């Protein structure tokens, strides 16, 4: 007999043990992510290409309407590449947020039948979106070659950090939404609208400088720092604004902490309500 | 010997609101705040102050027992006695409100077969996914892969999406994966309810093998007394969330069958998330009056009320009758008139006429299934009871001196002629 001892007690909020547990269940995390990718790419006609077509088409449409017709400034780089960098991070974030908020409901048959650390589910949906991000970046590389942008070394080094911040923001926000969604099922109808509004208060289609005196408020939105820094690092639009990035980092950390605590607090009811 | 499972004073309290399985919409909450903000604030303050504003209900209360390594323990009890709650706590799906459980060994649970199966994925892919969900390591799955495929008999179809499987293949594969788990403790719910009799036999056989050969500890929840008798030496009887009796199988089963309460009408809570659910079962006599004690020889009726919550296709209503809690007497499924290929949401009632002279004097139980045969159990209500009582003018009770031989009561035609 193995020496594993399991003790089940009334649940407290979270502890370090939760993180160790997620590590123990890392294979399941892998399998959930793998399932979501596999199923999605099997069900759509064009499969993997979807991850490229979606941001690419959006980029073309935004370029025509916002870049050409509306003449929105783009920090003196070509508008297509300007908006694509923004879209890349934005779609990772918004996609992960949407997916995560629904993940508990769509997996309720598993949650009510088997135990595993529930945090695995939102994590796997964000990872799934991360794969999409990686695929869509191929276009960016192509565009950078086409427009002749050669990023600095700092630029390259910054990308993982930016991804990490986006990851924290998506997980943090997603955890809150997922927990609320279990209790109040009408959240999912309000979410697309909420995300659309978020798009307009995030400098995806316009540079943050356009907001002038209001740009301080934009800085509170963690995605502002990420997208601004991504442009600065990859395209050299402006020098990297470390303060802005710092604010984003802290904001995401706070969001993630709130998300994890809230999720763990309501986690114990999931199987009872679902 | 150190017990492998120690359950100490475990209790589970449900908020009635949660228990009903209803979820609130944010819209409702917001409108209630806007309509009467003071009332809402008052409620909140009361709640924070710890005043009793919500109704609570203890699904389990002060449950303690121990299981020794290698033991197979059965857990029985009526609907709502807390069996499933206990199992959900043991598996960690829901935490207890009070008490503590210590498990010395690797546990695995089987509350359902085919958890997490995805129709678009192939058999091979689903084996890995389902195995991982059940807590198997990747190495373990790879090691057992061939044996899983063989046991399920799907060698040729391992790379076909399971949506193309026949229902039999699907269920075999779904059971085959958990059958190859190697835990120290196995927690099993009424999983044997799926599949046909043949398949159920195979599952029982596999479970017996697992306990005898590997000396595994099993906790087994079931309404099927035959399965309990076959597998378990010791049984825990739950009544209204508390332990009513722990002891040798036969003794506990007798107590359980003796205590079965008789209600002519049983209502069930309706979980809004399900597709369809049985909401009420009523037994009435030949004068349509609710009655649980039917005089022998008379017709009676079973009324099943059910609610369809989402448009449903190909649902079938079935009845299974048992005597003594284990002898299967009769299974019946709805005929063409009772079988609707397409149910619109709403309330339905099916009345089943049970002809007189079918059951002999005695206590009978039956279960109702709302299902897609061999594919999916949409709803199941077990352990519903009725009693057939004797009447003074019953000739058989005179002939057999008050002993009723056998559960069937068909009136046979004896045609006697003098031949020589």
Image (spheres, coloured by chain):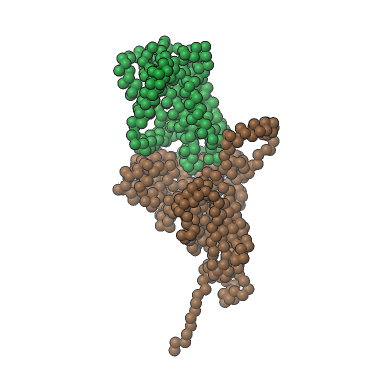
Q: Quadrant of residue A50?
A: top left
What's the residue at 59%, 60% (across, down)? B283
How many labels were placed on the picture? Answer: 0
Residue nearest the viewer, comparing A273 with A216: A216
Residue B19 appears left or right of A116: right
What's the residue at 47%, 41% (across, down)? A110
Q: Is residue B214 visible?
A: yes
* Quarter placement of the C terminus of chain B: bottom left
Spot occupied by residue A151 in the image (x, y as percentages of width and height): 35, 14
Spot occupied by residue A240 in the image (x, y as percentages of width and height): 42, 12
Q: Which chain is green?
A: A
Residue nearest the viewer, comparing B286 with B130: B286
Does B226 appear above or below A241? below
Does A147 appear above or below B21? above
Query: Residue furthest toward the bottom?
Result: B420
Q: Which chain is brown?
A: B
What's the residue at 32%, 45% (across, down)? B160
What's the residue at 33%, 31% (across, down)? A49
Residue nearest the viewer, comparing B71 with B372: B372
Residue A227 appears left or right of A261: left
Spot occupied by residue B300 in the image (x, y as percentages of width and height): 57, 65
Q: Is residue B180 visible?
A: no
Does B200 appear above or below B161? below
Query: Residue furthest toward the front?
Result: A69
Spot occupied by residue A168 in the image (x, y as percentages of width and height): 47, 24
């Amino acid at each position: 007999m193995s020496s594993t001892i399991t003790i089940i007690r009334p649940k407290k909020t979270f502890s370090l043990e939760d993180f160790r547990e997620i590590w123990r269940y890392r294979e399941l995390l892998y399998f959930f992510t793998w399932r979501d990718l596999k199923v999605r790419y099997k069900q759509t006609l064009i499969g993997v290409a979807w991850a490229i077509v979606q941001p690419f088409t959006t980029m073309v449409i935004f370029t025509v309407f916002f870049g050409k017709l509306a003449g929105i400034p783009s920090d003196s780089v070509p508008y297509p590449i300007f908006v694509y960098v923004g879209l890349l991070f934005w779609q990772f974030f918004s996609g992960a947020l949407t997916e995560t908020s629904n993940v508990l409901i769509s997996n309720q048959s598993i949650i009510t039948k088997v135990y595993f650390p529930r945090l695995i589910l939102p994590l796997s949906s964000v990872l799934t979106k991360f794969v999409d991000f990686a695929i869509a970046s191929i276009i960016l590389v192509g565009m950078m070659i086409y427009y002749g942008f050669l990023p600095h070394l700092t630029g390259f080094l910054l990308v993982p950090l930016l991804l990490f911040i986006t990851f924290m923001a998506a997980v943090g926000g997603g955890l809150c939404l997922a927990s609320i969604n279990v209790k109040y099922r009408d959240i999912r109808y309000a979410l697309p609208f909420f995300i659309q509004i978020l798009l307009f208060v995030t400098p995806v289609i316009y540079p943050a400088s356009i907001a002038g005196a209001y740009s301080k408020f934009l800085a509170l939105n963690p995605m502002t720092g990420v997208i601004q820094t991504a442009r600065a690092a990859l395209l050299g639009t402006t020098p990297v604004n470390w303060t802005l990035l710092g604010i984003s980092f802290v904001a995401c950390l706070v969001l993630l902490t709130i998300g994890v605590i809230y999720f763990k607090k309501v986690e114990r009811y999931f199987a009872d309500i679902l | 010997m150190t017990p492998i499972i120690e359950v100490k004073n475990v209790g589970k309290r449900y908020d009635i609101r949660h228990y009903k399985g209803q979820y609130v919409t944010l819209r409702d909450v917001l409108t209630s705040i806007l309509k009467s903000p003071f009332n809402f604030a008052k409620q909140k303050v009361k709640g924070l102050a710890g005043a009793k504003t919500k109704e609570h209900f203890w699904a389990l209360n002060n449950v303690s027992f121990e299981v020794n390594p290698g033991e197979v323990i059965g857990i029985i009890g009526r609907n709502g006695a807390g069996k499933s709650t206990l199992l959900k706590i043991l598996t960690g799906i829901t935490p207890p409100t009070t008490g503590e459980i210590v498990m010395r060994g690797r546990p695995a649970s089987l509350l359902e077969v085919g958890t997490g199966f995805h129709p678009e994925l192939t058999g091979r892919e689903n084996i890995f996914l389902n195995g991982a969900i059940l807590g198997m390591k990747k190495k373990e799955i790879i090691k057992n892969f061939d044996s899983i495929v063989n046991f399920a008999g799907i060698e040729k179809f391992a790379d076909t999406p399971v949506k193309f499987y026949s229902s039999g293949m699907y269920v075999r594969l779904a059971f085959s994966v958990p059958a190859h788990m190697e835990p120290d403790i196995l927690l099993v719910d009424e999983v044997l309810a799926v599949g046909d009799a043949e398949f159920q036999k195979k599952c029982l056989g596999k479970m017996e093998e697992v306990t005898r050969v590997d000396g595994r500890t099993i906790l087994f929840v079931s309404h099927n007394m035959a399965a309990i008798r076959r597998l378990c030496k010791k049984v825990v009887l739950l009544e209204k969330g508390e332990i009513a009796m722990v002891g040798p199988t036969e003794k506990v089963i007798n107590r359980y069958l003796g205590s079965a309460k008789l209600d002519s009408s049983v209502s069930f809570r309706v979980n809004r998330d399900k597709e369809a659910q049985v909401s009420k079962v009523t037994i009435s006599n030949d004068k349509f009056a609710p009655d649980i004690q039917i005089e022998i020889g008379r017709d009676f009726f079973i009324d099943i009320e059910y609610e369809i919550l989402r448009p449903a296709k190909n649902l079938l209503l079935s009845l299974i009758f048992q005597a003594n809690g284990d002898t299967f007497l009769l299974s019946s499924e709805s005929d063409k008139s009772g079988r609707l290929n397409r149910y619109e949401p709403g309330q339905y009632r099916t009345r089943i006429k049970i002809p007189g002279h079918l059951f002999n004097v005695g206590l009978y139980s039956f279960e109702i299934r709302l299902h897609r045969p061999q594919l999916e159990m949409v709803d199941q209500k077990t352990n519903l009871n009725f009693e057939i009582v004797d009447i003074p003018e019953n000739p058989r009770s005179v002939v057999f001196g008050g002993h009723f031989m056998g559960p069937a009561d068909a009136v046979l035609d004896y045609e006697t002629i003098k031949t020589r």
